[in-house]
Image (cartoon, grey):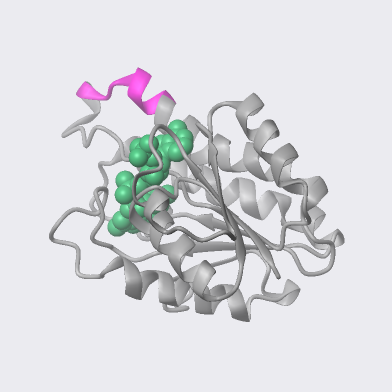
């Protein structure tokens, strides 16, 4: 039975990923930060819960020790929005630093900790990024820290792809679409189920040849 690790899984897209991975016969290690939320209602013996703040290196290491099994799929999903500041003058640098830490550095840290466990010749690392991290697509500006965090995540991922390829591990940068979650808000046109269905299809079709691609949930290639 394949093994998956999903961060930030107590709500939103992460929760839906756990639900669909269990349907697809994965053993799932799901993380939550403060409360397991809906995860505790799933009642599946293949689901293992870990309390992890993705900024906490020790908690990440302890989770990997507990997982101990080879990991087929790592999904770095946990993420936060920024302050939606209306202008450069009011950027809050403490908040901006946290956004960069959670969205850009933490997925790299989790991947680093998972490396010894990732299945050689078949493992996949998925980074849940955003079209908002695309420099080519940045017309409206604003969302400074969120955009910069996802751009940095994209570059961290592309920069590590050759090393991971040597281990037979592929990386996938995926934009879930604008999805109705706490982050996406009530006006988002896509439901989590549809987005995650697409994400699962992209994961299934992923090969080493496709490593480092930046696509949306429907498979559309996105500009860097
Ligand atoms: N929704 C969209 O339209 C959209 C579009 C593009 C990209 N994305 C990306 O998709 C991913 C999931 O977003 P979502 O829409 O599902 O957001 P969400 O509903 O706000 O859920 C975010 C998840 O991340 C967790 N998280 C936040 N900070 C954390 C930390 N320091 N340590 C551990 N977990 C943490 C949250 O845990 P708590 O409950 O403890 O806060 C929650 O489980 C994010 O990376 C986001 O940037 C979303």
For residue 17, above or below residue 6: below
Q: Which region of the structure is painted magenta?
A: 90-97
Residue 44 coordinates in the image, percent (x, y): 51, 61
Magenta segment: does it hold 108? no
* Image quarter of residue 19: bottom left
- The extreme top residue here reads 94
The chief SS type of the magenta part is: helix
Residue 54 coordinates in the image, percent (x, y): 53, 34
Magenta segment: does it hold 95? yes
For residue 129, above or below residue 68: below
Answer whether residue 175 is visible to the viewer in this image: no
What residue lies at 23% left-to-right and 52% top-to-bottom? 140
What residue lies at 53% left-to-right and 34% top-to-bottom? 52
| Viewer-proximal residue among 102 and 158 | 102
Residue 211 coordinates in the image, percent (x, y): 68, 68
Q: Is 176 on the left-hand or right-hand side of 27?
A: left
Residue 215 coordinates in the image, percent (x, y): 49, 70
């Amino acid at each position: 039975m394949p093994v998956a690790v999903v961060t930030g899984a107590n709500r939103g897209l992460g929760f839906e990923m756990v639900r669909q991975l269990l349907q697809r016969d994965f053993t799932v290690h799901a993380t939550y930060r403060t409360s397991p939320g809906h995860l505790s209602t799933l009642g599946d013996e293949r689901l293992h819960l870990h309390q992890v703040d993705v900024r906490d290196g020790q908690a990440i290491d302890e989770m990997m020790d507990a997982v101990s099994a080879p990991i087929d799929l790592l999904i770095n999903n946990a993420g936060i929005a920024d302050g939606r500041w209306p202008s450069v003058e009011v950027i809050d640098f403490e908040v901006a630093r946290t956004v960069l830490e959670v969205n850009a550095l933490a997925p790299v840290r989790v991947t680093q900790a998972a490396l010894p466990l990732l299945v050689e010749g078949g493992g996949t690392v998925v980074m849940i990024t955003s079209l908002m991290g695309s420099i080519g697509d940045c017309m409206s500006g604003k969302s400074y820290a969120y955009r910069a965090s996802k751009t940095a995540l994209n570059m961290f991922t592309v920069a590590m792809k050759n090393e991971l390829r040597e281990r037979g591990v592929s990386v996938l940068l995926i934009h879930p679409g604008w999805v109705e979650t706490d982050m996406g808000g009530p006006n988002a046109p896509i439901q989590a189920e549809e987005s995650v269905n697409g994400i699962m299809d992209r994961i299934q079709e992923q090969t080493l040849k496709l490593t480092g691609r930046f696509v949306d949930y429907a498979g559309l290639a996105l500009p860097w």
